[in-house]
Image (tube, rainbow, N blue to C red):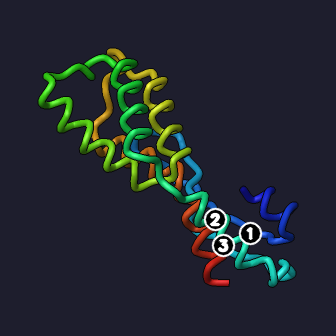
Amino acid sequence: MLTSLRSSLGVEVTLDVAIRYPKSGGFLAQTVGASVLPGSDAASLPQAASRMRAALTGPTKEQAEDWLIMLQAACAGGRRSEVSATVALELYAGCLMRFPADVAKAACMRLALDPRPGGNWFPTLAELNAMCDALSSSRRLMAHALESA
């Protein structure tokens, strides 16, 4: 997205990244802010902000449900009774619909491919939400920076 804004609109956005060290070990880079650089084409800022808003569009309910069915099929522990599966599908789909469509799909794919000790179990709602939040945080920050510029 950064490259697209720069090349097509002359708008330069930078991301502020902080390194976090979770208790579980390792590290991760987390986007904590975004800013529009001076010298960006001011006339293109509204169009850039519009593109960012469009990039934050969530999936349809049907798309979210399709991806959850794929995730459920790929994970152990994902099979439920018909009633509980329907309720879970509504709950999880509602979570996915709060995030950009491509992020929701990517989160389902990443969780489906996540090698966990003891097998790949269906994620909790909190895990799904955390994955979507992590994947979309930089985009939300960029949109805010462009709208504030």
Residue 23 badge: none
* Quadrant in which the N terminus appears: bottom right
Rendered location of residue 105, percent (x, y) = 50, 38
Residue highlighted by disc 2 = 52
Q: Are marks 3 and 2 in contact (CB under 8 Å)?
A: yes
In this view, the mark in front (2 or 1): 2
Name the residue carrying label 3.
Answer: 49
Quadrant of the image for the C terminus?
bottom right
Residue 142 in sight here: yes
Instruction: Label 2: state its secondary structure.
Output: helix
Mark 2 / mark 1, whichever is N-terminal? 1
Image quarter of residue 53: bottom right
| Residue type, label 1 | Val
Query: Residue at 68% of width from left, 75% of height from top?
Result: 35
- Taking the spot 24% from the left edge, 44% from the top edge, the residue there is 91
Q: Is residue 109 above or below residue 47?
A: above
- Whether residue 18 appears in this view of the structure is no
Q: Residue 56 at x, y = what percent?
A: 54, 59
The amino acid sitting under disc 3 is Ala
| Above or below, 22 relative to 108 | below
Specify few, some or many for label 3: CA neighbours under 10 Å numbering under 14, 14-19, or 20 or more. Answer: many
Q: Residues within 10 Å of mark 1 (few under 14, many from 20)?
A: many
Residue type at tag 2: Met
Q: Are marks 3 and 1 in contact (CB under 8 Å)?
A: no
* Rendering coords of residue 50 (x, y %): 65, 70
Q: Position of residue 40 (x, y in %)?
A: 83, 78
